[in-house]
């Protein structure tokens, strides 16, 4: 039998590294997305032409170093969408990781293998990256806790850049306690003793989700509101979720093109068509369009500062629907991807932390409830997640 | 030792089929570009995701059937640029065929393996397709006779379509006699007894080529003029070679997108970046742009009718430079490709037949002289080629 039945891990020898014998994560195992450096192991980036253009790293990424020092042990490097460009998890070069919670559906991406490994019970937690939704989407689709931390709060050194103004490193876990403990280690602090006191419900985001999803999340929302106290309905994006999404798409795509252009020009790398098309469209974005998008980003940031004073968090569906079925056409999936990012764009645009709370299903597949806080309130969100788990 | 040292043939078992024992091509061997159907053998199209979307053909392409009936035997299917989209011959999925005449340079494409096999002496002739230069360019780069026949004259059934208004099937040979005999078989007629009597020299095309190429071709031009009789200098494209090229690029790219779009949408195939970018740009061409290009095509056709009354042919450099060195950046190669097609666009725009005459070198690598005739004068061009060979 294959030692990689979920196709969660990259092909070839399995990278294994023991953590220090003691520490807050002693005895825990974790997997590392193959965009995050581990010394002595090539970073493959989910693309067949990435590795030959990039030397084998000689240092661990900061986040890996930190996890090993806290006692956790690496059990492998995990599959990713090509150079993180995707949120569905399909990869025609190395195979699509299985979604253990919904085997006929995509796992979500780009941190697809990390989600698959954790959801399949192969390790306790896993590291991923999230630029436009790459932790939050697979967390929602696979029924996991997942966090996109405050932008810039966790050292990104040793991690493959996509779009610097949106890139973050996050993680997945099956249980809220492990999930929170990783955060305490990385943020260097304990969970706060008290929870936020006001819960805003993003009515536009719930309205944007499929009705079955909005309905499936209602019991979770009710329980969350009971935990927090005050509940109030609010519009998240007065300018329109799709307008925010357009700004994020513009900024992220043009930054991604600038990041990868030298490699692409020198190596003419192989890509799935949809990935190459996205890069090409990114190359066509003008400075004037970037300026408009950057102004809309300022509007989104202003909105979140207004909505989220201390003690307030906001709830929205993580994705508007559960994981799409495998094997659909590019055009169908492209529109789904755009729709998903109408809900995930708040992260990249505002830099706010966001946590996916699992436990609900629609159409028989997982779908998550997200909580968003003001920048820097990551530990508060982890505390809510742990309290919510009960 | 590999039985595919030039990487000219597709991977896997070698397709071999004996021709009928007698016939004008009895004893001759030929290779078949892997975009041309051979019954019982998959047509791979130079792309890793083409074959699974297309059933194994149950009939030979008309042109293969014809060659077998004339006595020639198939010795293999040859490498091609991905679904014929390219004129340089590089293929990152299956490897780039070697250019036996210039091993540090690209072979030219998209009929790269057919040119490589013939230039390497592996077979007597080989079939290719030419939409925007895919026979003429590798013929020039590899030092071979090569023909793009009159558009629509040779049955295209059983051949992978790219851009129907420009697609043709052609062939390569090392010697002018075999080269002409294939034509006599396919066109169903003998070479004419008399040669054309007027040779036009396309001054704009010679001016557009690298000076070293224009100079290297002068002795051939002088000898050709001596063979024909009257020689006259003319401008080929009064509107500009680059204007003609823009029209051809527009029509060909948008037709190629329309051809491949259903497959791409259903399969999200893998491509080298440069190929996927070209397809994406093709998808963005508007109907208004197509109309402008179609009008310029009418101007080009009018120009050729004016220039080429019966008994007149036109000479131009096949390519503006010899084969580029291997391993250059996308942006460098992209501009070279555009420059090459400023000379090859006359074929796709006007449907005129064109033959590459080998034998000259510049910078130590082959470069060919082309002769172009009015539509339907294919046998006249083959007669010139045979007389020119002496």
Image (cartoon, coloured by chain):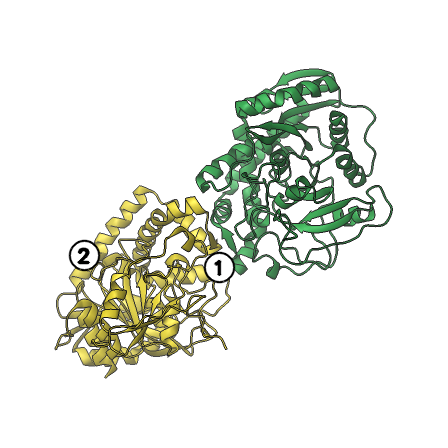
Chain colours: A yellow, B green
Relative image position of residue A78 (x, y in whole percent): 38, 67
Circle on res. A330: 1
Q: Nearer the viewer, mark 2 or mark 1?
A: 1
Count of numbered labels shown in the rendering:
2
Relative image position of residue A260 (x, y in whole percent): 37, 49
Q: Residue furthest right?
A: B22
Chain bearing tag 2 is A
Any part of residue A229 in sight? yes
Q: From the viewer's perspective, is B39 left or right of A26?
A: right
Any part of residue B239 in sight? no
| Residue annotated with mark 2 | A302
* Element on which disc 2 rests: helix
How packed mark 1 is, by other alpha carbons closer than 10 Å (few <14, some 14-19, many 20 or more), is some
* Element on which disc 1 rests: helix
Q: Which sits in the foreground, A130 or B362? A: B362
How packed mark 2 is, by other alpha carbons closer than 10 Å (few <14, some 14-19, many 20 or more), is few
Relative image position of residue A371 (x, y in whole percent): 24, 70
Q: Indicate which disc, 2 or 1, sits on the residue closer to the N terminus.
A: 2
Instruction: Give the residue drawn at x 22%, y 79%.
Output: A386
Q: Which sits in the foreground, A248 or B141? A: B141
Instruction: Give the residue drawn at x 26%, y 49%.
Output: A294
Relative image position of residue B318 (x, y in whole percent): 61, 30
Q: From the viewer's perspective, is B27 left or right of A269?
A: right
Chain bearing tag 1 is A
Q: Which sits in the foreground, A241 or B256? A: B256
């Amino acid at each position: 039998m294959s030692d990689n039945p979920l196709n969660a891990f990259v092909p070839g020898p399995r990278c294994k590294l023991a953590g220090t014998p003691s520490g807050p994560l002693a005895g825990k195992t974790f997997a590392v997305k193959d965009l995050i450096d581990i010394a002595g192991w090539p970073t493959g980036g989910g693309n067949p032409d990435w590795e030959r253009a990039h030397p084998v790293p000689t240092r661990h990424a900061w986040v890996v170093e930190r996890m090993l020092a806290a006692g956790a042990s690496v059990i492998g490097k995990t599959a990713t969408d090509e150079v993180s460009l995707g949120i569905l998890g399909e990869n025609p070069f190395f195979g699509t990781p299985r979604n253990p919670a919904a085997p006929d559906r995509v796992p979500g991406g780009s941190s697809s293998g990390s989600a698959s490994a954790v959801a399949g019970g192969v390790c306790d937690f896993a590291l991923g990256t999230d630029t436009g939704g790459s932790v939050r989407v697979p967390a929602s689709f696979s029924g996991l806790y997942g966090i996109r931390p405050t932008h810039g709060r966790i050292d990104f050194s040793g991690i493959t850049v996509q779009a610097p103004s949106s890139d973050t490193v996050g993680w997945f876990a099956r249980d809220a306690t492990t999930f929170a403990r990783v955060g305490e280690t990385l943020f260097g602090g304990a969970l706060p003793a008290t929870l936020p006191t006001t819960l805003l419900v993003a009515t536009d985001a719930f309205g944007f989700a499929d009705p079955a999803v909005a309905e499936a999340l209602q019991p979770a929302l009710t329980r969350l509101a009971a935990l927090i106290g005050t509940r109030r309905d609010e519009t998240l994006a007065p300018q329109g979720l799709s307008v925010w999404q357009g700004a994020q798409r513009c900024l992220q795509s043009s930054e991604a093109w600038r990041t990868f252009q030298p490699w692409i020009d020198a190596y003419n790398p192989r890509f799935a068509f949809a990935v190459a098309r996205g890069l090409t469209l990114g190359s066509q974005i003008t400075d004037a369009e970037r300026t408009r998008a950057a102004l809309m980003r300022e509007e989104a940031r202003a909105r979140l500062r207004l909505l989220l004073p201390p003690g307030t968090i906001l709830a929205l569906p993580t994705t508007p629907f559960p994981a799409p079925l495998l094997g659909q056409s590019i055009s169908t999936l492209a529109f789904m991807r755009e729709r998903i990012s109408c809900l995930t764009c708040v992260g990249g645009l505002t830099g706010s932390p966001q946590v996916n709370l699992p436990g609900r299903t629609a159409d028989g597949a997982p779908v998550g409830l997200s909580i968003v806080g003001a920048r820097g309130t990551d530990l508060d969100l982890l505390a809510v997640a742990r309290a919510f788990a009960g």
